């Protein structure tokens, strides 16, 4: 490494520490989750009738979150445990992740109407046996990637670790290949933004990443998961997922520069109930207002689809891009699980 390269790396590290991207992303996703909780399942016209103009959407009181934030914290704790024991590896991550998911499923705080796929899979994870037998191979719900942001924030991972672990955390519950690919891409987006990539080039980088990884099956992390599907080979299995994600990324690229901010984003990139649409619509909300995090969050929450998950991911992108100072203190002080968010954020920002 040359002296110039070393100086550039030190400067980037200093900027990252000052920005506190991990804290920003974690609080962003929790705030988006809380903002979207009361608006989920109702249309845009009803949201504005009940809560006023979408650009003035208030943070609820109390600012309770959903299973999206709860499961994000579960992934974060599992990562903390796994990396505390050494380099992140499949077995070292799968065990605490499985334990965290089972504990979440049995917790009295699991009262936020979680998805059926997560509940069924966690019930099976509680029994002995390979985790692949608990995975739901037909599901690509957004529960796969609404919780994956920590994989883009924990420092020290190489590309293989980040991708494999992102897909593994999805696969424990959602075994569809599109759920795996969308989770990988979501973690990649958070990572790139935290590292300082400009929003304007983000979709292009994600598309290139998807093309480069389209035929790669992470056997070390996924084992024989692909055999639970009807695919003739692991390559065929993963290509199905990446192709669906590439299709929605192309849709985002086509509309992002000309989108009317007053248009419900779900009409352009999907309602977000499934993993690839949650990624696409959250990206669209973020890219419409890349330097206005609260506006992006409010646009995501005032949608006709899975508002809490869309806003959750939008907040993760905005917070990774702008850092902890993106969010007003009067909001971060009120959000549920504030202490847990601060602890993980401080750990990964250190």
Image: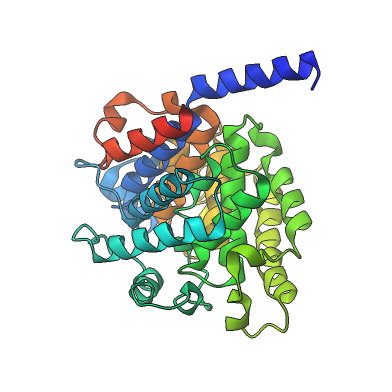
Rendering colour mode:
rainbow
Q: Where is residue 266 in the image (x, y as percent from the top left)?
A: 51, 56
Residue 14 visible within the image: yes
Quarter of the image holding residue 23?
top left
Q: In this view, does 159 lie to the left or right of 107?
A: right
> Which residue, as the protein is rendered here, is positioned at the far front?
85
Instruction: Indicate left or right for 137 with 231 as reference.
Output: left
Q: Tell me: 6 left or right of 346.
A: right
Q: Quadrant of the rendered structure where residue 99 is?
A: bottom left
**Compared to 338, does 83 lie above or below?**
below
Q: Give the number of marks.
A: 0
Which of the pair 4/58 is nearer the observer? Answer: 4
Judge whether 175 appears above or below 84 on screen.
below
* Residue 1 at x, y percent in the picture: 79, 22
Does the image show residue 268?
A: no
Coordinates of residue 255 in the picture (x, y in percent): 66, 49
Residue in the picture at 38% in, 72% down: 125
Residue 117 placement: quadrant:
bottom left
What residue is shown at x 57% (from left), y 48% (from top)?
187
Residue at 63% across, 64% down: 220
Residue located 71% across and 66% down the image: 243
Q: Which of 29 and 42 is in front in this view?
A: 29
Which residue occupies the extreme right position in the image? 2
Question: Could you say where residue 73 lies in the image, as x and y percent from the top left?
Answer: 36, 48
């Amino acid at each position: 490494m040359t002296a110039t390269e070393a100086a550039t790396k030190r400067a980037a590290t200093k900027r990252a520490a000052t920005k506190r991207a991990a804290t920003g992303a974690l609080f962003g996703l929790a705030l988006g989750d809380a903002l979207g909780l009361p608006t989920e399942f109702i249309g845009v016209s009803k949201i504005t009738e009940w809560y006023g103009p979408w650009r003035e959407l208030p943070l609820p009181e109390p600012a309770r979150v959903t299973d999206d934030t709860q499961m994000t914290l579960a992934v974060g704790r599992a990562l903390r445990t796994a990396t505390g024991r050494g380099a992140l590896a499949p077995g070292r991550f799968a065990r605490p992740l499985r334990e965290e998911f089972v504990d979440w499923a049995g917790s009295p705080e699991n009262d936020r109407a979680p998805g059926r796929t997560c509940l069924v899979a966690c019930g099976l994870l509680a029994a002995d046996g390979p985790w692949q037998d608990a995975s739901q191979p037909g599901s690509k719900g957004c529960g796969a990637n609404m919780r994956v942001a920590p994989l883009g924030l924990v420092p020290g991972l190489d590309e293989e670790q980040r991708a494999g672990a992102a897909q593994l955390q999805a696969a424990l519950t959602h075994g569809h290949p599109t759920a795996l690919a969308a989770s990988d891409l979501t973690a990649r987006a958070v990572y790139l933004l935290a590292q300082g990539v400009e929003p304007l080039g983000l979709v292009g980088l994600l598309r290139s990443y998807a093309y480069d990884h389209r035929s790669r099956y992470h056997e070390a992390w996924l084992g024989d998961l692909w055999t639970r599907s009807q695919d003739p080979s692991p390559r065929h299995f993963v290509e199905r997922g990446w192709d669906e994600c590439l299709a929605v990324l192309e849709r985002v690229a086509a509309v992002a520069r000309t989108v009317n901010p007053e248009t419900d984003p779900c009409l352009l990139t999907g309602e977000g109930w499934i993993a690839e649409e949650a990624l696409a619509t959250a990206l669209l909300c973020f890219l419409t207002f890349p330097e206005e995090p609260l506006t992006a969050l409010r646009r995501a929450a005032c949608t006709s689809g899975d508002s809490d998950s869309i806003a959750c991911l939008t907040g993760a992108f905005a917070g990774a891009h702008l850092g902890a100072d993106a969010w007003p203190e009067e909001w971060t002080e009120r959000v549920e699980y504030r202490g847990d968010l601060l602890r993980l954020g401080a750990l990964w920002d250190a």
